[in-house]
Image (cartoon, rainbow, N blue to C red):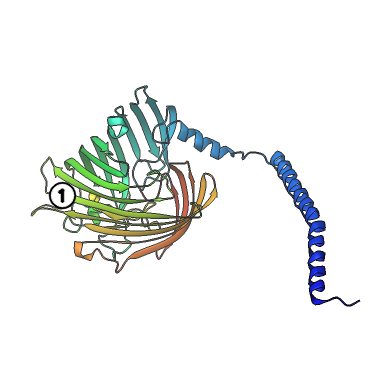
């Protein structure tokens, strides 16, 4: 039978409508069945998934942070480091007490495997102005019987001499944050230095004249005043994966006893951390510079000159390897998340120490590179283990606290 064109179109339309009527309920049933299966699978997974369990180091770091952090520990505890760069591993007993009004008192002593010594009492008043103003002070004595000194300048030979330094200090400071990102600091201190040659040969006075190394054997007493202003959006000064730091600090070292060693110093830092993938990766860049200034007839003693080398700046060089009237340092780090309180880092440092302020540029820099692992709490770096390489060899670093402060 032959159908007309109109009847053929009508028959085709009827078949399509019938097919939809048959298939639609089946498709709806299939979608409902699949949704039910997905819901059942998700419920079974939820029952099997256990909450994350922190390991022992993570639990200890978090407990310290919740108790007030590494700087404010209650009761008896062990203190690490904090004597002077070059002391190597140092530890000792300490006792801290936090009062109900927020005041803090901490006393501690430390001794290093290189015979460095420290005794200190620190006190902090209750927070003022809604916590925006902090006032604290300390009395401190430290003894370093053997410190390195090399010829001044970046291109100096690696010819080490040695000296000893004992410092006694009584100081106070105020830290004010009128708004969230702004940090203002001011303080004053009485500081007494006693320097001399060291038991280890060669001693500094046998290697240099006072003209070559100002301050040999000097025992200056200073009224040291400082002012600091900065913008800081980091989550914390001891550990952060994001934020910006722009800060300048002016120092005035005014000698109180006889001697030509009064001077001024300006330190500046610019730091930017760029988080990637919610902070699992971090690009960390910083530039630090220090410059000194003296009046006619005055000098900067060598032991207070800007210096580079050691575990917190030019890490591929020995402590105090480069020193002079002015210095500059650039650091780049690539950090990545390992566990909640552990991260790894690749780093590159480049810097120099120069006699003239006009030489603070990026030519003729000494550099190093390395890798390290850091153990930290949410706000503080507890331990750094790093290895760094430069043209003067390989160095292993065992440090407490962050490399960039």
Residue extending furthest toward the top? 100
The location of residue 212, given as percent across then percent down, is 19, 59
Q: Is residue 176 above or below residue 125?
A: below
The location of residue 179, given as percent across then percent down, is 29, 41
Identify the element where label 1 is drawn.
strand
Q: Is residue 303 visible?
A: yes
The location of residue 307, given as percent across then percent down, is 28, 54
Q: Is residue 161 visible?
A: no
What's the residue at 37%, 51% (across, down)? 312
What's the residue at 88%, 77% (across, down)? 2
Q: Which one is nearer the viewer's eye here, 92 or 205? A: 92
Instruction: Specify the quadrant that holds the N terminus.
Output: bottom right
The location of residue 357, given as percent across then percent down, is 20, 61
Q: Is residue 31 above or below residue 356?
A: above
Q: Mark 1 — residue?
A: 263
Q: Which one is nearer the viewer's eye here, 13 or 173? A: 13
Badge 1 density bin: few <14, some 14–19, many ≥20, Cα 10 Å: many
Residue 384 appears left or right of 351 = right
Residue extending furthest toward the right? 1
Q: Is residue 317 above or below residue 222?
A: below
Count all numbered tags in the image, as a single digit: 1
**Residue 166 quadrant:** top left
**Residue 44 quadrant:** top right
Q: Which one is nearer the viewer's eye here, 312 or 8? A: 8
What's the residue at 76%, 52% (across, down)? 28
């Amino acid at each position: 039978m032959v159908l007309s064109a109109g009847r053929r179109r009508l028959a085709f339309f009827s078949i399509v409508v019938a097919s939809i009527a048959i298939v639609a309920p089946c498709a709806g049933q299939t979608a409902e069945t699949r949704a039910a299966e997905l819901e059942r699978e998700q419920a079974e997974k939820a029952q099997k998934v256990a909450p994350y369990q922190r390991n022992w180091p993570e639990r200890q770091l978090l407990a310290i942070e919740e108790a007030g952090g590494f700087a404010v520990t209650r009761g008896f505890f062990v203190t690490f480091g904090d004597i002077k760069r070059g002391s190597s591993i140092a530890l000792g007993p300490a006792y801290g007490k936090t009062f109900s009004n927020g005041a803090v008192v901490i006393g501690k002593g430390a001794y290093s495997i290189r015979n460095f010594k420290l005794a200190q009492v620190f006190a902090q008043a209750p927070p003022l102005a809604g916590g925006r103003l902090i006032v604290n002070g300390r009395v401190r004595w430290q003894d370093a019987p053997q410190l390195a000194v090399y010829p001044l300048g970046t291109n100096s030979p690696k010819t080490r001499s040695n000296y000893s330094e004992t410092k006694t200090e009584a100081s106070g400071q105020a830290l004010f944050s009128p708004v969230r990102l702004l940090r203002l600091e001011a303080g004053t201190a009485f500081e007494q230095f006693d320097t001399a040659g060291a038991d280890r040969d060669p001693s500094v006075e046998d290697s240099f004249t006072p003209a070559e190394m100002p301050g040999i054997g000097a025992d200056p007493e200073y009224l040291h005043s400082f002012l600091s202003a900065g913008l800081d959006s980091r989550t914390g000064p001891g550990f952060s994966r994001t934020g910006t730091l722009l800060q300048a600090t002016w120092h005035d070292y005014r000698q109180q006893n006889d001697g030509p060693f009064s001077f001024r110093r300006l330190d500046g830092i610019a730091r930017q951390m760029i988080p990637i993938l919610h902070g699992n990766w971090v690009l960390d860049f910083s530039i630090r510079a220090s410059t000194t200034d003296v009046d006619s007839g005055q000098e900067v003693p060598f032991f207070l000159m800007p210096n580079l080398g050691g575990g917190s700046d030019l890490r591929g060089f020995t402590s105090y390897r480069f020193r002079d009237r002015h210095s500059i340092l650039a650091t780049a780090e690539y950090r990545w998340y390992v566990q909640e309180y552990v991260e790894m880092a690749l780093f590159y440092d480049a810097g120099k120490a120069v006699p003239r302020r006009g030489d603070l540029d990026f030519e003729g820099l000494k550099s190093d590179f390395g890798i390290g692992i850091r153990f930290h709490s949410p706000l503080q770096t507890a331990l750094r283990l790093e290895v760094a390489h430069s043209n003067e060899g390989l160095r292993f670093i065992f440090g407490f606290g962050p490399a960039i402060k």
